[in-house]
């Protein structure tokens, strides 16, 4: 199995509904996102997926979130914009763009601060 990853970032504000503490108030982060793609076989160029293409799709998703109040962006207008929910959202969106039978998004990591990271993947 081969695996590659691409890292990107975005800035945004959020608040965690019903959270008991400071994070219930609106605050911001500079999120870092790392997306992984895997394939059993490489393409004719010897790649899982072109880093340029993986990065472009990831940035397309992150552009929807960048410099926004995440609580106002669907689906986070209905669910808390936690790092865990952000990781699943990005995973689902990116999978729809990249997965093609040979290549599969395997996991997404989201850091809201340097020491704090959430991950989403499916078995």
Image: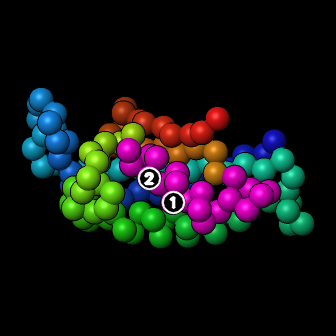
Q: Residue 93 bears which disc, if any?
A: 1
Q: Residue 56 bears which disc, if any?
A: none
Q: Residues within 10 Å of mark 1 (few under 14, many from 20)?
A: some
Asked if residue 54 can be seen in this view, the reply is: no
Residue at the far front: name it: 78
Q: Residue at x 38, y 44 (%)?
A: 85
Q: Residue at x 77, y 58 (%)?
A: 101
Q: Position of residue 112 (x, y in %)?
A: 33, 43
Q: Is residue 103 magenta?
A: yes
Q: Position of residue 107 (x, y in %)?
A: 58, 43
Q: Quadrant of the N terminus?
A: top right
Q: Position of residue 55 (x, y in %)?
A: 57, 64
Q: Which region shows up in magenta?
A: 85-104
Q: Residue at x 52, y 51 (%)?
A: 91
Q: Is residue 122 left or right of residue 88?
A: right
Q: Is residue 101 left or right of residue 77?
A: right
Q: How is the image coloured?
A: rainbow
24 to 21, vertically: above or below? below
Would you identify the image quadrant in which residue 16 lies? Answer: top left
Asked if residue 60 can be seen in this view, the reply is: yes
| Marks 2 and 1, how far apart at CA | 6 Å
To which residue does mark 2 refer? 89
**Mark 2: which secondary structure?**
helix
Q: Position of residue 59 (x, y in %)?
A: 48, 66
**Mark 1: which secondary structure?**
helix
Q: Are marks 2 and 1 in contact (CB under 8 Å)?
A: yes
93 to 26, vertically: above or below? below
């Amino acid at each position: 199995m081969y695996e590659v990853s691409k890292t990107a970032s975005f800035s945004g504000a959020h608040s965690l509904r019903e959270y008991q503490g400071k994070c219930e108030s609106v605050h911001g982060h500079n999120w870092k996102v790392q997306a992984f793609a895997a394939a059993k076989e490489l393409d004719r160029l010897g790649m899982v997926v072109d880093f340029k293409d993986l990065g472009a799709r990831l940035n397309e998703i992150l552009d929807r979130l960048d410099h926004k109040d995440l609580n106002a962006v669907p689906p986070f207008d209905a669910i808390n914009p936690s790092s865990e929910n952000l990781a699943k959202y990005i995973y689902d969106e990116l999978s729809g763009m990249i997965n093609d039978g040979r290549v599969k998004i395997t996991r997404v990591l989201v850091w809201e601060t340097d020491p704090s990271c959430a991950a989403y993947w499916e078995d």
